[in-house]
Structure formats: C-alpha cells, structure tokens
Image: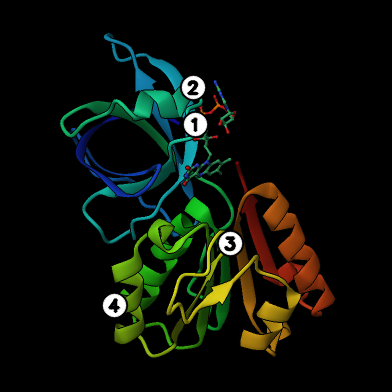
Amino acid sequence: MAIERYKVIQVDSPVPDVRVFRLRPVSGDIPPYVPGQFFFLHRLDANGASILKRPYSVASAPSMAYLEFAIDMVKGQMTSQLEKIRAGDILGVEGPAGHMTYKNEQNAAFVAGGTGISPFISMLRQITEKNIQGRFVLFYSTRTRDHILFSGELKALQKKHPGIEVVITLTRETPDGWAGECGRVNREMLSRHVPTARELDWFVCGPPGMVKAIRECLVALSVDPKKLRMEGWG
Ligand SMILES: Cc1cc2nc3c(=O)[nH]c(=O)nc-3n(C[C@H](O)[C@H](O)[C@H](O)COP(=O)(O)OP(=O)(O)OC[C@H]3O[C@@H](n4cnc5c(N)ncnc54)[C@H](O)[C@@H]3O)c2cc1C
C-alpha cells in the first residue's frame, strides 16, 4: 500500500489526554473504506519518507470529506510525536486495512472501551446517514463523565435514529445525578440491556483485557462466535 500525504486540517482536545485529528489528502481523493477499518498514520521526515507508523481506527464515516481519528496520548513513540502536530502539518496515511468491518448489518451491538469508540462512531454515523433499519446498542465504557468522547454527537444520533441506544458506563466515578451505568461492562449489564444477545451481531473494541472479558461474557450468553468481531489495542 502506498503512503499518501495528508494535511491536518483540525486538531481538537475534547476530553483529557485524547486528541481528535481531521486530515485531508494533499492531492487526490480519500480511498474507499468501510466503518471499522483502520489506517496507518506515518510520521514523515523532511524528504517525505516514513520514520514511524502506527494503526488507528477511523472515526469518520466514508461519506465525510476528511478522515478523523481519536487518539489517546499515551506518551509512547508515536503519540509523543502526534502531541506536537498542529493544523497545517503533514502526516503520511496508508490504508485502509482491517476486518472488523460493518457491512450494514441490522440489529447490532457495539462494546467500546475508551478510544475504542472510534470505529463505532463511524458505524453509527453511517447507520444514521443511510437510515439503516434495526436496533443498534452501543455500550461505551470510559473513566469519568469528562472522558466521554463524541458526547454531543451520540445524543444527536439517538435523536435522529430511533433504533440507536447508548449505554454509557463510568469506571472511575459515580457523579451526582448520573443516570447511566457505573463499573465495567459485565454479563449482567449486557443481558439487562440486550436480553436477546444471540440475535444480534456484536462488535467489541478496546484494551485487549476488556475485549477478552466481553468475548467470554458473550459466549456465555450464547452468542455464536461467528457473529462476533473484535479488535484490541492498548
Ligand atoms: C488495529 C488498531 C487500531 C488502533 N486504533 C487506535 C485508535 O483509534 N486510537 C488510539 O488511541 N490507539 C489506537 N491503536 C493503538 C495505536 O496503534 C498505538 O499502539 C498507540 O497510539 C501507542 O503508540 P505509541 O507509539 O505512542 O506507543 P509505543 O511507543 O508503541 O508504546 C506502547 C505502550 O508503551 C507505553 N510507553 C511507551 N513509552 C513509555 C514511556 N516512556 N513511559 C511510560 N509508558 C510508555 C505507552 O503508554 C504505550 O501504551 C490501534 C491499534 C491497532 C492495532
């Protein structure tokens, strides 16, 4: 796959320790991709050669005029570089790649941990744009209320599409007046919101420990592993 030059058109820091980057190709078009796929971002040297690359799940929907990524600033090799990136800078982009793809399935559930929300905001954007009929339940586990990414958009998507339900669970606090869930996603929480787990397609994305634990819960809830797609990082 070729590495294309992209210009960073916007950098936001909507929640602590996460940056959201929007990028557009310097020339040509964004290649076709499917929600759930990822691209490699490359740090380029002065001659345009790649010096470092890491994969990032795409958060934008394919219809959008830019690629969007939500990246946890974990102070590793790549993220220390990305922390210095500003609008106007150039990054290399290679892809898309990846098999955790959403193919317009009706009746699906998504379980996200932290920036694992990225592939699912892409999927929910597409579901809403295309008005795909069915029930779509997002379980989104994050540390505190201040760490909820795409918070306003998640509310707007639920208003636009009556089939979308968002279950947010906070793992590190129970704020006053919080009406959502608290603690890690577990079997009880999953089956309370989705008593018919085996009838849905499931997508799970987040830290590997969480992905493994959710897989075990879903298998115990009689979900056919063929209806389960997962991606772990962190
Ligand atoms: C398919 C896929 C999709 C992904 N999508 C996303 C995404 O959408 N968003 C996202 O945020 N990430 C995503 N990742 C993870 C991403 O690719 C990188 O692994 C991540 O950004 C860390 O890269 P890094 O070079 O900064 O860390 P590395 O240098 O590779 O370090 C790895 C780990 O070691 C720790 N570490 C490194 N140096 C230090 C240090 N000096 N002190 C303390 N700890 C240290 C870091 O905290 C980090 O957790 C994805 C991974 C995969 C495989």
Label 1 packing within 10 angstroms: few (<14), some (14-19), many (20+): some
What residue is shown with label 4? Answer: 156
Residue 171 image label: 3
Label 2 packing within 10 angstroms: few (<14), some (14-19), many (20+): few
Q: How is the image coloured?
A: rainbow
User: Distance between the Cα atoms at labels 1 and 4?
Assistant: 31 Å
Q: Residue furthest front?
A: 176
Mark closer to the chain start, 3 or 1: 1
As helix, strand or loop, the secondary structure at mark 1 comes to: strand
* Between marks 4 and 3 in the image, the one whose residue lies nearer the viewer: 3
User: Distance between the Cα atoms at labels 4 and 2?
Assistant: 35 Å
Viewport quadrant of the C terminus: top right
Residue 77 image label: 2
Q: Residue at x 47, y 60 (%)?
A: 144
Residue 54 image label: 1
User: Distance between the Cα atoms at labels 2 and 3?
Assistant: 27 Å
Q: Is the residue marked 1 within 8 Å of ligand 1, measured from its CB?
A: yes
* Between marks 1 and 2 in the image, the one whose residue lies nearer the viewer: 2
Q: Is the residue marked 2 within 8 Å of ligand 1, measured from its CB?
A: yes
User: Distance between the Cα atoms at labels 4 and 3?
Assistant: 24 Å
